[in-house]
Amino acid sequence: MKIKFKPVGAQKDFFQDDETKLLHLSAGFGFGKTTILLYKLLKLSRLNFPFHGGLVVPTFTDFKRDVMPAFEGLFDKHRIRARFHGSDHYYQFPWSPGRLYIATAERKLRGPNWAYAGINELTLIPMIRYQEVIGRVRVKGAKSPQIVSSGTPEGIASEYYTAFVESPVAGSKILYGDTRENADNLDPGYVERVLAAYPQALADAYIRGLWVNLAGNRFYYSYDPKANDMNTSPDPNLPYLIAMDFNVDPFCVSIWQLWGNQFVGLDEIVLEGGAGYKTENMIQALRQRGYDHRNSVICPDPAGKNRNTSGKTDVEILQQAGFQVKVKPAAPRFRERQINMNNLFEKRRIVVNPLTQPKTKKDFMAVEIDPVTLEKIKKNPKLTHLSDGVDYMVDIFAPFNDHRTQNTVARIR
């Protein structure tokens, strides 16, 4: 049988891609995410004849309210004689003995192995359920063992931002759908009403399907990827500035150069997942990446001047390794750091390389400020460390009061 319909924009790309193992559609409200996901599952059922598949939804209420009516609409429109088994929660399609099982993210996934799977509203389910789906799609002989998903982005603090954007999982791909592409299927004034009702950040998420910081208390509120992102290559005649924050896991540095009065981002190193990293571990990682005492200046956390368990300070360890270290007696206050950094972002005196500094970029987008203490909120153990290091570096070469210190960066001859 043939199902005829006219997908638009990213809907078409999503439906046609049968090769990407982990395919996700990030789209705004009204884009038709659920509908195109169900069309895709009908196709995968046919491609993976005669094997079973699965559809995961946040809750069974979501299934009855959103998915079931959408499926019934497709069946009626195309005269498909499908059957839903209410007690065992599966669909039986007329073209295959394989079933499409319905599961919810409310509990651990159980049941038969699947040849393919779909997930509706992915960003509303825990990451552990997504991982369980990946482990369940394992039928030998499946022609197209895809895991397809759709949803509206829920902010860059989401684990799915990391999985699809920041550090993409192998075999994954993300497509972006703009609600305006589906305008012919919506009320004529819908998009205009949403744009009028939401600020720009929410409109980017709920109309364009983009990952943005949905919190209204960003520490780096002037950071704008459109203005402050730039793909760059290092100037071989200038030293590298290494912004370092002392934290055992993750232990982070970001690498910069000062082009005139502009801080240009080049690289980052993040050591994580161990029992705790020491300064010696980062020194080794820097050297392996090509950053050493001959071409680099380290700008660390002033707390590194305190003694550690080895009897030496972290700054002394860096100096004994041959590195030139520039550090102030104390870190600037959070409010001064915020004002200074945002002023430089606004004037485009700080630019980030989104390809080589993805975690630094995420920090600038996601770190929030406590409205009472005016400090950075540190509830996420993987955030704030990279941006803290940049704060310290910037405070040395472009301090808050703009009274320049005697620090200079000489050209390498």
Image (cartoon, rainbow, N blue to C red):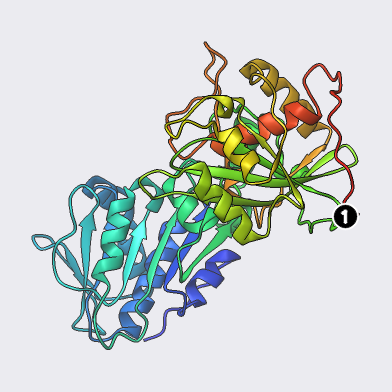
Q: Based on the displayed image, in which of its 4 quarters is residue 86 positioned?
A: bottom left
Q: Quadrant of the N terminus?
A: bottom left
Work out whether 1 lies above or below 177: below
Q: Secondary structure at mark 1?
A: loop
Q: Nearer the viewer, residue 128 or 101?
A: 128
Q: Nearer the viewer, residue 131 or 377?
A: 377
Residue 359, position as x, y percentages in the image: 57, 47
Q: Quadrant of the C terminus?
A: bottom right
Side of 39 relative to 211 (left or right): left
Where is mark 1, residue-wise? 237
Asked if residue 207 can be seen in this view, the reply is yes
Residue 201, position as x, y percentages in the image: 62, 37
Label 1 crowd (10 A; few <14 / some 14-19 / many >=20): few
Q: Nearer the viewer, residue 88 or 303?
A: 303
Residue 261, position as x, y percentages in the image: 88, 37
Work out whether 289 lies above or below 384: below
Side of 179 relative to 237 (left or right): left
For the point 32% across and 48% down, the residue is: 125
Q: Based on the displayed image, in which of its 4 quarters is residue 147 positioned?
A: bottom left
For the point 64% across and 45% down, the residue is: 254
For the point 50% across and 69% down, the residue is: 14
Residue 167, position as x, y percentages in the image: 51, 57
Side of 17 relative to 403 (left or right): left
Q: Amino acid at mark 1?
A: Asn
